[in-house]
Image (tube, grey):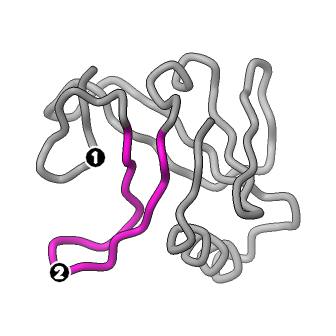
Amino acid sequence: MITVSQTAKEHALQLMKEENKPEGAFIRVGVDGGGCSGLMYNLVFDTELKDGDQTFEDKGIKIVVDKKSFLYLIGTELDYSGGLNGKGFVFINPNASRTCGCGESFSV
């Protein structure tokens, strides 16, 4: 399962509203090769499900992840940080053995 913190929920809903996302829009989370640690997180708003997608809902936020990426993201929490060291969505991934300083890439 992939969960969402209360802060991430609030910011996701705000962004969906600002970007005029249609009813039924969801957060698509994925993992791509690249970054300084080998794997990079991918986070976008989407409205179309694809074959093999895994769907979760937490705190009223629908999260969709492709089957391959899900193996890297099991148990991950999507959070939001607004601190001095950066602002944006962050992944708290218990499967990551190493993360880079920017928090956008990881390895397992």
Residue reaching furthest right?
A: 23
- Marks 1 & 2, CB-CB < 8 Å contact: no
> Residue 59's x, y, as percent?
71, 63
Q: How many marks?
A: 2
Q: Which mark is residue 6?
A: none
Question: Residue at point 53% right, 63% down?
Answer: 5
Disc 1 residue crowd, few under 14, some 14–19, many 20+, Cα 10 Å: some
Q: Disc 2 designates what residue?
A: 84
> Residue 58's x, y, as percent?
70, 54
**Residue 32, picture quadrant:** top left
Q: Disc 1 designates what residue?
A: 104
**Mark 2 falls on what kind of element?**
loop
**Mark 1 and mark 2: Cα distance apart in space:** 17 Å
Is 73 placed left or right of 20 in the picture?
Answer: left
Q: Taking 12 as reference, is 77 above or below it?
A: above
**Mark 1 falls on what kind of element?**
loop
Extent of the magenta region = 76-93
Q: Taking 63 as reference, is 95 above or below it?
A: above
> Residue 95's x, y, as percent?
35, 27
**Residue 22, picture quadrant:** bottom right
> Residue 40's x, y, as percent?
33, 35
* Sequence-first disc among 1 and 2: 2
Is 77 placed left or right of 106 in the picture?
Answer: right
**Disc 1 vs disc 2: which is toward the camera?**
2
Q: Amino acid at mark 1?
A: Glu
Q: Is 46 in front, or is 57?
A: 57
